Image (cartoon, helix red, strand yellow):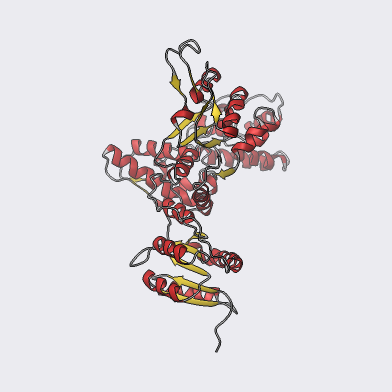
Amino acid sequence: MAETSGPTILIVDQDHDLLEWATKHLAADDLRILRCDQADKAAKVLEKTEVDLVISEIQLQPFDGLELLTRIRQQSPSTLVILTAGFPSTGQVIEATQQGAHDVLRKEALPFELRPVVEDALQIAEDRRSASQPEQELPSLDGRVKIIGVSRALQDVFKIVGRVARSDAPVLVTGESGTGKELVARAVHEYSPRRKAEFLAINCGAIPENLLESELFGHEKGAFTGAIAKRAGRFEQADGGTLFLDEIGDMPLSVQVKLLRVLQDGTFSRVGSNETLSADARIVAATNKNLADEVVAGRFREDLYYRLNVVEVKLPPLRERPEDIPLLAEFFLQRLTRKNGMARIRLSDEAIARLQEHRWTGNVRELENTIARACALASSNVLLPGDIPLAVAPGGDKNLRQQLDRLLDAMPSGNGQRWILEEVAKRMMERNEGDVKRAAAALGITATELRGLFREEAAPAVRDRRAGTAGAAPKSRR
């Protein structure tokens, strides 16, 4: 029988059951599938056979999948590689992407993701069959940045970091406050050729406008009151390295003009000097604002926006990746207990469930603070739901209040509305462990009105308040 002329896939994994499953899962006409259970055997197959796609586990013997990837890139640059792992680390995903892996997949996601990713890779491989020039190799790195997470959304962030770190293109990191934008900026630096030089960070919103220009570009002696000596700015200090501009959306327009000049031609002048200086600093900026909206509002320069937003890295909020919450909570617990010399503390399953149900408007920063408070107040080595001090977001739980408004507006007044109000009040009291003031703030009503929700005359008063009428508040009964 003649060999198939279609694409060839090599699957490498020490788990023979997985090899069998993957072979059946991917089986198709005109597709040749080879299998190996060790990295050295795979390397020998690749020496003798032209393979379009390799699907390899990272944990292999006698060398790992990242080393196999490196050998494949050297020996057969047109061969695409998909790596798999139970829980790939930040470093593994970024390094694999830098080394040219087509994708990195979690094993538990293979039933859903393997086939479409393979089909995409084979389409690319078809176009690469005639390619002969190897891409530039990149060094294997042991990254110092630790970003915790196994969600698909975060894995996609790792892959973008792995790709963009190789260049000097400006990067704009966006996302809500507390999502870890500075960690991503550090990862871009530490996985780049600039990693041996300085990484400097500056918060553009925390420095007064009259000092920000000096902070960035430096000043001469006597340039302004208090300038008692010449000082180099952050751009000079970060020469050859990376400058992280946090909260770039808060930068005054007057400073934006000078930043634009640096991005255009790499030159600037210290405050109080006419001398033109130059610095080679890679720019990574971050913001929790929508810069496109800021441009429309006239608060951010359009030309600067496009200079900064060459590559955008969007960080997902924590509430959209609940599968990362147990890992993050465990990481914070271990770090706190080690730092303080405490006995090991663990989370009960019920406590983890409570963490995953919370909205985390403050994202990872809020989770870290919550775990720190729980550790400080812990009375045993197991944290239960009651030991988790969940905070109420400023302004209350807007999502819950909006749902309540929709329910009440859709119903005629009477017992139906009263029942809904009572149920919401009970649940909010439970969520806030009986704290009337916190529960009332979350609902957007007063503590007196919340107490009155359990009495018949209270419901009309709350409805009137929501509608903006002058309904009298119920009398307090203590």
In this rendered view, identify the residue nearer to me: 376 or 5. Answer: 5
Is 123 situated left or right of 346 in this image?
right
Instruction: Name the image quarter holding the N terminus.
Output: bottom right
Coordinates of residue 159 in the picture (x, y in percent): 51, 52
Coordinates of residue 2 in the picture (x, y in percent): 56, 87
Q: Is residue 135 above or below residue 313?
A: below
Is 301 situated left or right of 77 in this image?
right
Visible in this render: residue 372? yes
Coordinates of residue 221 in the picture (x, y in percent): 45, 13
In this rendered view, identify the residue nearer to me: 97 or 47. Answer: 47
Q: Which residue is pictured at 34% across the width and 67% down the height?
A: 61
- Counting the numbered discs, the total is 0
Visible in this render: residue 459? no
Q: Which residue is pictured at 43% across the width and 48% down the height?
A: 148
Q: Could you say which quadrant of the image residue 240 lies in?
A: top left
Q: Is residue 210 above or below residue 116?
A: above
In this rendered view, identify the residue nearer to me: 317 or 367. Answer: 317
Q: Which residue is pictured at 45% across the width and 76% down the height?
A: 48
Q: Is residue 38 above or below residue 87?
A: below
In this rendered view, identify the residue nearer to me: 98 or 203. Answer: 98
Q: Is residue 243 above or below residue 4?
A: above
Is 339 situated left or right of 476 in this image?
left
Coordinates of residue 472 in the picture (x, y in percent): 66, 24
Q: Which residue is pictured at 46% across the width and 71% down the height?
A: 11
